[in-house]
Amino acid sequence: MKTMKVISRSQLPTNPPIIGTIVILLVLDRFKAPQAVWGAAFVILLLYWIIIIFIMQHQEGIKLKNPELKTKDEEDEEDDDK
């Protein structure tokens, strides 16, 4: 089986933690967490979201140019040339 080449995780843009936030809130609700735990969770999630939004606003997209990584269109063009 041919090894698949993928973009490194460090090269991908930051994604907002929507699912993680929902899971944390549902777990707190499920286990009937006290109000102090809810408050601490909200503060931590709020700080985390602020940091993520700040990081997302200061990212710049770049195009990776690696001759080993080719798009499907480039592969089709090479096949047509042969």
Image: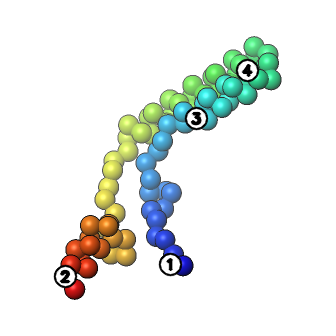
> Answer yes or no: do the residues labelled 4 and 1 have beta carbons within 8 Å?
no
Query: What residue type is disc 4 on?
Result: Asp
Dot 3 falls on a residue whose secondary structure is: helix
Q: Earlier in the sequence, mark 2 or mark 3?
A: 3
Q: Earlier in the sequence, mark 1 or mark 3?
A: 1
Dot 4 falls on a residue whose secondary structure is: helix
Q: CA distance from mark 1 to mark 2?
A: 23 Å
Q: Earlier in the sequence, mark 4 or mark 2?
A: 4
Dot 2 falls on a residue whose secondary structure is: helix
Residue in the picture at 21% in, 78% down: 80
Report the disc number at residue 19.
Answer: 3
Q: Earlier in the sequence, mark 4 or mark 3?
A: 3
Which residue does the numbered mark 4 point to in the structure image? Answer: 29
- Is residue 8 in sight in this rendering? yes
Q: CA distance from mark 4 to mark 1?
A: 46 Å
Residue 67 at x, y percent in the picture: 33, 75
Query: What residue type is disc 2 on?
Result: Asp
Viewer-proximal residue, 58 or 41?
Answer: 41
Residue in the picture at 79% in, 18% down: 32
